[in-house]
Image (spheres, grey):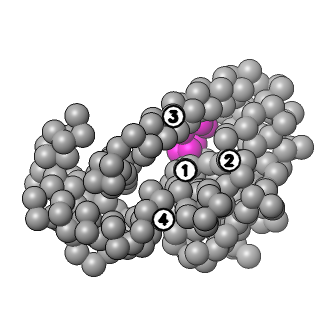
Amino acid sequence: MLHDEAMENITSFLPQIKIFESLPAEIMREIEQLVTRSNTYKLPKNYILQTPDDERNGLFFVIAGKLRLYKTNSAGKQHTVCILSEGGMFGEVETFSLGNRGTYVETMEDSIVFSIPTEQFEPLLRKYSELSLRFLSEISKRLRDQEELVEKLVFRDLRGKVLYFLNRLSKKFGIEENGYRKIDIPLTHQELANMIGATREAVSLTLQELSNEGIIVTSRRMVMIHIEKAMKELA
């Protein structure tokens, strides 16, 4: 169970969640009242929070850590839908769905998540049109992102898939250093393979090829991508 100081930190973090940014104080006060110990979870790494057979009701917000949302095909291969970091959210209420049906949700590291049940959030959506419009905008953005992801991963060869996904991760989680973007997520070859639905052996060979060409730099659980070279190939 989280102590009082941790709960206060969560409340102060809420305005930093994109969908809540710059909302009127009146709305934020009502949202803050929904943060309780009973709907706040401290989760260990590799904890599966949701499965397709046990989907969570309500909205979930990442306060700390990272979560991976993925689907599996009939052969058991995993395909990553998205990775959520601090401020990210998933789930659905009666009015809106964030497109997470049929997915697994797993922590990539120790994480803190809090949820707002449907029956508590629906009244706010009906009461405040500004909040509803925020959700519509977020849903539209996610649809565009997922359409792009599907297109790139379906029509590119393995090299293109690996480079595209690494570039996507670097944009979201990257730290720029001397012309490179360092992906700030511990990432094994197997984890990357799971994300794009390939074998570890094939991904390892592709990473070695990209490394030999100076497009990426790899070390144990770390990848840096050369910004200019990557963009030139992906163009």
Label 4 belongs to which residue?
194
Looking at the rendered image, the disc whose residue lies closer to the viewer, 3 or 2, is 3
Quick one: label 1 or label 2, which is nearer the N terminus?
1
Note whether residue 63 is visible: no
Q: Nearer the viewer, residue 71 or 32?
A: 71
Quick one: label 3 or label 2, which is nearer the N terminus?
2
Label 3 belongs to which residue?
147
Three-letter code for the amino acid on which mark 2 is drawn: Asn
Three-letter code for the amino acid on which mark 1 is drawn: Val
The reply to whether dot 1 and dot 2 touch (C-beta < 8 Å) is: yes
Seen as rendered, the residue at the extreme front is 75
Question: Where are the magenta residues, as a range?
Answer: 15-24
Image-based side of 67 in relation to 214, left or right: right
The reply to whether dot 4 and dot 3 touch (C-beta < 8 Å) is: no
Label 1 belongs to which residue?
81
Q: Residues within 10 Å of mark 2 (few under 14, many from 20)?
A: many
Give the numbered dot on residue 100: 2
User: Picture coordinates of residue 23 (x, y %)?
Assistant: 62, 30
Helix, strand or loop for disc 3: helix
